[in-house]
Amino acid sequence: MIKADIVNRVAEVADVPRVKAALAVDTIFNSMKGALQAGKRIELRGFGVFQVRDRKKGVGRNPKTGVEVMITPGKTVRFKPGKELKDL
């Protein structure tokens, strides 16, 4: 499923024009991006939790060539599915 599929589904279920559905979906995604950028946790009950986590530095390996690569420290977004999603 891609963003266009989500927009189409919102337009269909809410019985609104596709342009308004696209605006709603964009607003939700932009709000989520802003919250994650600020380091906040996003909890969607029944779906899951998005959380910004620190990534440690370390050594990785290219599986194709076997060459070691340094992994720089940084931040990453983690998703933990909720109970209802796991049960599906």
Image (cartoon, rainbow, N blue to C red):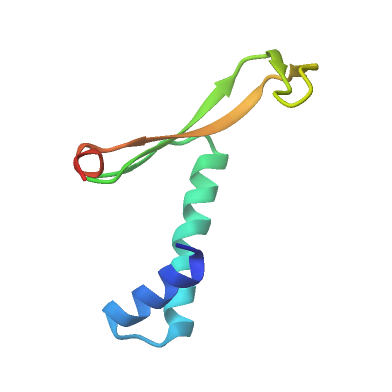
Residue 33 visible in the picture: yes
Give the position of the C terminus as an image quadrant.
top left
Q: Position of residue 33 (x, y in %)?
A: 53, 49
Q: Quadrant of residue 69?
A: top right
Q: Is residue 8 above or below residue 65?
A: below
Q: Front-most of 32 and 64?
A: 64
Drawn side of residue 10 relative to residue 52, left or right? left
Q: Front-most of 82 and 16?
A: 82
Drawn side of residue 46 relative to residue 28, left or right? left
Q: Position of residue 45 (x, y in %)?
A: 24, 45
Q: Quadrant of residue 43?
A: top left
Q: Is residue 27 above or below residue 33?
A: below
Q: Position of residue 36 (x, y in %)?
A: 51, 41
Residue found at x 45% / y 67%: 25
Q: Pick out the residue farthest to the top.
A: 58
Give the position of the N terminus as an image quadrant.
bottom left
Drawn side of residue 25 relative to residue 68, left or right? left
Q: Is residue 68 above or below residue 52?
A: above
Number of callouts? 0
Q: Pick out the residue farthest to the front.
A: 64
Q: Position of residue 14 (x, y in %)?
A: 28, 79
Q: Front-most of 3 and 38?
A: 3
Residue 24 visible in the picture: no
Residue found at x 25% / y 38%: 86
Q: Quadrant of residue 76?
A: top right
Residue found at x 74% / y 26%: 64
